[in-house]
Amino acid sequence: MTHHVTLVPAAAGSPTGAAGAGALGAWRRFHWAQDVRARTGGDLLGRLARAEYGGACAHPDSLLPRTDRRAARLRQLARSERAMPAWVLAAAGSSPDLEPRERIALGEAWEHSCGPDGGLNATAEIRRRLLSAPGPAEAAFLLDVADANALRPLSAREAVELRPMGRTLRHALWRYLSGVAGGGLGLPPHPAEARDAYEQLLLAGCWERVLPGASAGQRFRTAFGPLTEPFTASPVVAQSMLLGRLEEPGAGLSGGMSVLLTALAEALSAHARTARVLTLTAAQPDDTRRAELVGRFSKAHLLVRLPVDSAEVLDPQNAATHQPALAWWARRAFELPGARPDITHVRFADDASLAVAQATRRFGAKLAFTVTPDPHRTMDERHAGLPPEQTTGASHALRLDMHRIFVADRLVDRADLLVAMPGRHGTQELLEHFPQLEKRSVHLQPEGIAPFRPAPDDAATGRRMLARLFGCGGSVESLDATDRHLPVLLCVGRLHPVKQQEQLVQAWLLAGLHHRTTLLLVGGSPTAPTDIEAAVRPRVTELLATNPVARRRAALWPALRNRHVRLLERALAQTGPGSALYVCPSAKEEFGLAVLEAMEAGLPVAAPQRGGASHYLRDGVNGRLLATESVATLAEGLRSLVLTPAPGLAAMAAAGSATVRERFGIDAMAASLADAYLTTCRPASSRRARTVGSRGDDT
């Protein structure tokens, strides 16, 4: 059953869970609702919010750097939802120092101006700029804008005359030529002669678009093999998680979402009337050299790796640079006869998700977006007080968050289906941070986890894991066997500041719990740590090194396969009531899949009171809610949890397990989503008869 609600403002004085939304929330309300309560904060956050959302009230702020004022203006153009004169956009894009995130905002503004009059004015202006010898970055951007909007300002012969210098412009030119009549005239004739594996694959993909079936496209057809085979059943659902590796939950940027998407895809295809599920991820640096980029989780669930031209893993810091290429690759995948999604579901406010959304629009499918108040609700807490002239250090994180909020707004605007998770205050917290959602319909999504399926060797595996944990002591991965009688505090999650493992260790020490409990942290890549993991782990080990008792009673394990995590939780739960407790110290959790898995295994759990866990945890009944805003409040919560008598912990564990069984099955989640997908797609049921690229493609 699908459950849609329409968001309306809360009554005066009603709790919204978003108290203290601060200057950012006030200026956002001013922008969408002309709420006169807007206030200008004197710090960097307040000034950036006023510049971006203040409209006519936002006179140029001389204390803000020019780049901040320019970024705010470009986002205003994108949010205007109306066609701007093409010459205005062209002039805005001519600055040689535009950053990739600014170009993303400008690209969104261009999209509004490419529809009226059949795109004639936009085509003419882009042509004028391209023929006026722009710099490589501007030329690449304009070619990508043209291709993304089915505009053809230059013929193939004219485009080749751009004489591209540098890799970025060369790749943008190839992508553009792949959609132009006679584009093969400008493409290198033999992909095998390209400079590296990525260029070979890109050229093969371009040639396959120009001359389907030609030998030059063979590598592309091999890489995307299963998608090149016709598939006529429907509906086809695409879902994406481009930041992180789906196959490695707990490592790098791969958290509980990787586990959820895998289980959800299986449930959608097995029980929820979905013919095929495509899960899009970003290829890792070594993946581009692989012969095949499409894998099968099952007959109806395909993993599609989109190539990335980088020796580094895709992350929030570099995703904007790769956004145009990711959008092109996603669209190429969607056009293949074995893909052709009816609806695409994105769940993150990041540049890679926006790329997938753009490809979805270009292809003609519907778009679903899971909207969450993140990072909105912690902006004041994390960024208030920065001086307005600051351009380094902590201000970079603030500027990235402002960009993420802009991306979330664009995804909300693009979405045909909005999905939300009900929180402790229903949907009112969401409306507090997204004023534009007033009167829009939102699908409230029940969440779920995959059922645990026992195997014959589970007991032996569990014993081996406990033996590993209580091995010899003195090692970073083991506890002293003499401490086996102490309760174990277990924390599973990717190593990241938002997960707050460092604060957990500090709170554990502050509360003196290292004298009466042991601690096991599980997370982080076992072989190739990211820069963030490489920074977090040493800080944790340094904290432990300051106290000999704590060092002996804490263990750090790298990420485990999800099944092994659940076996470990079961093994710990079976050692007796109160012998192990699960702790999630995150600054926030939108849902907390790992928390639910620990509950299902029979462990008493504690999770942040801010975020999704408060929707299903009743403090003291089926778990504990922690104030994780500071080390002191976290220490107080941990102390209260550990001092709970064993019968109370056992009762909480039993109630928590029942909560998961009764409310959080993956099949119910899949059925609800499938119903929402079908309802959203139904008016366009005849879409499969259309020709892909019907807006004027020459392919």
Image: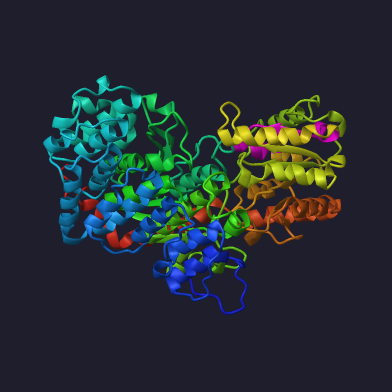
- For the magenta stretch, what is the residue range? 549-568
x and y, in percent, of residue 616 in the image: 64, 59
Q: Which residue shows up at 31% across the image and 56% down it?
A: 109
Q: Which residue shows up at 56% across the image and 36% down it?
A: 252
Q: Which residue shows up at 35% across the image and 48% down it?
A: 103
Eyeballing the image, is 205 above or below 143?
Answer: above
- On whether residue 587 falls in the magenta region, the answer is no
Q: Residue furthest bottom?
A: 12
- State which quarter of the image contains the C terminus: top left
Q: Is residue 546 left or right of residue 228?
A: right
Q: Inspect this view and state whether residue 364 appears.
A: no
From the viewer's side, name the closer residue of 311 and 448: 311
Q: Is residue 401 left or right of residue 221?
A: right
- On whether residue 550 falls in the magenta region, the answer is yes
Q: In this view, does 696 lie to the left or right of 390?
A: left
Rendered image quadrant of residue 476: top right
Q: In this view, does 333 lie to the left or right of 129?
A: right
